[in-house]
Amino acid sequence: MTRWYFDHLAAARVDYDIIGQSYYPHWHGTIKNLRDNLRKTIRRYHKDVMVVETAYPSRDIHPSPAAARNMIWPQTPAGQKQFLTDVIQAVKEASGGHGIGVFYWHPEATFTPGATGRLARPDANSVFDATGRPLPAMNVLGAD
């Protein structure tokens, strides 16, 4: 998908500076798939890359067997932290220093007393627990 999309941008002579990728293992594959995609993308388009959207559950969400195959980290606070550490490391190791950052999707998605809808219950991907206390993954978000 990355190649198809950016080849079309190149054909249309669209000017851009950075390539942003999403990475969710249950949709996008293994951490090796992420590393390979970043490496190939940098080699083909000569742009900086970043993961602009990623998240991982800190509690068991019972994924389908197909999705669970790539969710190799435990669905625990420690597993969430290791997932984020591994994603950040994959970006840091991207070819020629072209991996420039990681954004965690909706880290604050936690329970809000009196809320309705999405914030009426804690989101498993939040980096806060149901009481609003930070989970261990928070400690790697500012890592150099």
Image: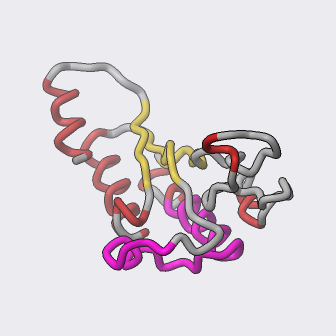
Quadrant of the image for the C terminus?
Answer: bottom right
- In magenta segment, residue 14: no
Q: Nearer the viewer, residue 103 or 143?
A: 103
Left/right of residue 143 with respect to residue 85 in the rendered view = right
* Above-or-below relation of 70 to 93: below
Q: Residue at the location (26% across, 20% down)? A: 14
Q: Residue at the location (42% across, 48% down)? A: 22
Image quadrant where residue 46 sits: top left
Left/right of residue 31 with respect to residue 58 in the rendered view = left
- Counting labels gives 0
* Above-or-below relation of 28 to 5: below
Image quadrant where residue 127 sits: bottom right
Image quadrant where residue 116 sits: top right
Q: Residue at the location (37% across, 71% down)? A: 67
Name the residue at the left extreme: 11
Q: Position of residue 79 (x, y in %)?
A: 63, 75
Q: Position of residue 140 (x, y in %)?
A: 72, 60
Left/right of residue 2 with respect to residue 97 in the rendered view = left
Left/right of residue 75 with respect to residue 144 in the rendered view = left
- The residue segment tinted magenta is 62-90
Q: Position of residue 29 (x, y in %)?
A: 34, 67
Q: Nearer the viewer, residue 52 or 48?
A: 52
- In magenta segment, residue 65: yes
Q: What colouring style does the render use?
A: secondary structure
Q: Position of residue 138 (x, y in %)?
A: 76, 57
* Above-or-below relation of 72 to 108: below
Mostly what secondary structure, the magenta segment? Answer: helix
Q: Nearer the viewer, residue 2 or 133?
A: 133
Q: Residue at the location (50% across, 42% down)? A: 52
